[in-house]
Image (cartoon, rainbow, N blue to C red):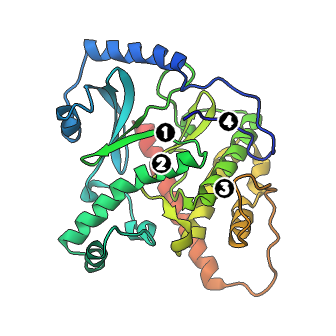
């Protein structure tokens, strides 16, 4: 799947840029990792052993990162360098309010649906399986919708095998929080991310946990990662709150370099168009929203303030954890 980097606000695409997924970039990157693996190697993690035993993974190069819901490894598969995401078990994950994200997801059969409602041992197993399968389903859906996400290959024994996103030098792409950018780049990338969020919502999904920690920057720009908590917009009562948080997180990140972005209201503008049934991947956005005048819903305002406080605290903890590594 060839990625195309486009300007998010303008209707015309930006000037074409070199594609980091082309064979040239891969050929630069693969030998480097293969040599490193031959020289050092590493013990096969328990979660990856089934893929090695079944011939899906030839060798494990190294650990790429460890997050709140999974550990990610660089692996070699038939001469190709990919990454393998090994999901942590529920008791090890730091992801809170799981049910809030899974609301509205369709279970595969009525027995599983009943089990989820009873929350017994079978229900917990079903919930765990749905969490692990949700990401690959979201990746296939969004890739087909033109969203820049890693190309998924397969899920086996709770492990997601997918494309390794690389920068222009052929190294693993940095996260957004690891990159300094100019005001011009901030405006361009923010606009691009707004367009990506619109494409996601047009495909029926909201990321639900979008932040500077799960956006990579490859040779062509931002790539969205980490989607096991993706929300089905039409059937989740928390959809707007999660969309607003995703959009405002991007506004905060890019607004550090381009302060004018802090005055924009893309979340409410996007949601209003979505509710009207007129949202399309190519709709024009302005970042402006006319608020209705009238009596304030005090409870709703207080709830939003509390949610934003909790999210700010979570971002602070993630930032401190990232800086400590």
Mark 2 crowd level (few <14, some 14–19, many ≥20, 10 Å Cα): many
Q: Is residue 24 above or below residue 261?
A: above
Mark 3 crowd level (few <14, some 14–19, many ≥20, 10 Å Cα): many
Towards the viewer: 199 or 285:
199
Mark 4 crowd level (few <14, some 14–19, many ≥20, 10 Å Cα): many
Of pointers 2 and 4, the one earlier in the residue sequence: 4
Of pointers 2 and 3, the one earlier in the residue sequence: 2
Residue 150, disc: 1
Report helix, strand or loop for mark 4: loop
Of pointers 3 and 1, the one earlier in the residue sequence: 1
Residue topped by disc 3:
198
Q: Is residue 95 above or below residue 235?
A: above
Report helix, strand or loop for mark 3: helix
Between marks 2 and 4, how big is the CA–CA gap? 18 Å
| Residue 220 x, y percent position in the rendering | 63, 30
Residue 139, disc: 2
2 and 3 marks in contact (CB < 8 Å): no
Of pointers 4 and 1, the one earlier in the residue sequence: 4
- Residue at x-position 55% and y-position 60%: 205
Q: Is residue 260 above or below residue 268?
A: above
Residue topped by disc 4:
5
Between marks 4 and 1, how big is the CA–CA gap? 14 Å
- Residue at x-position 19% and y-position 35%: 54
2 and 1 marks in contact (CB < 8 Å): yes
Towards the viewer: 323 or 74:
74
- Residue at x-position 40% and y-position 67%: 97
Marks counted in the figure total 4
């Amino acid at each position: 799947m060839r990625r195309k980097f486009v300007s998010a606000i303008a209707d015309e695409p930006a000037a074409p840029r070199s594609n980091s997924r082309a064979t040239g970039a891969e050929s630069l990157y693969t030998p480097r990792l293969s040599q490193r693996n031959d020289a050092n190697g590493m013990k096969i993690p328990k979660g990856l052993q089934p893929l090695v035993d079944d011939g899906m993974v030839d060798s494990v190069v190294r650990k790429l990162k460890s997050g709140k819901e999974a550990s990610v490894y660089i692996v070699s598969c038939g001469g190709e360098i990919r990454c393998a995401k090994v999901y942590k078990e529920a008791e090890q994950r730091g992801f809170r309010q799981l049910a809030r994200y899974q609301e509205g997801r369709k279970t595969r059969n009525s027995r599983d649906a009943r089990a989820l409602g009873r929350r017994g041992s079978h229900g917990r197993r079903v919930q765990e399986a749905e969490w692990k399968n949700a990401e690959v389903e979201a990746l296939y859906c969004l890739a087909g919708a033109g969203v820049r996400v890693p190309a998924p290959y397969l899920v086996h024994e709770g492990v997601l095998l997918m494309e390794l996103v690389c920068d222009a030098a052929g190294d693993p792409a940095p996260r957004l929080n690891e990159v300094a950018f100019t005001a011009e780049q901030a405006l361009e990338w923010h606009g691009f991310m707004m367009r990506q969020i619109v494409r996601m919502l047009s495909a029926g999904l909201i990321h639900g946990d979008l932040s500077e920690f799960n956006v990579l920057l490859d040779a062509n720009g931002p790539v969205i990662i980490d989607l096991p908590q993706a929300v089905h917009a039409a059937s989740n009562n928390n959809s707007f709150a999660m969309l607003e948080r995703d959009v405002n997180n991007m506004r905060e990140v890019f607004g550090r370099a381009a302060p004018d972005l802090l005055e924009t209201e893309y979340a409410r503008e996007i949601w209003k168009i979505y509710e009207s049934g007129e949202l399309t991947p190519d709709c024009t956005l302005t970042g402006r929203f006319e608020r209705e005048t009238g009596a304030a819903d005090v409870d709703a305002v207080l709830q939003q303030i509390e949610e934003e406080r909790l999210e700010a605290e979570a971002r602070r903890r993630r930032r401190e954890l990232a800086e400590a590594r």
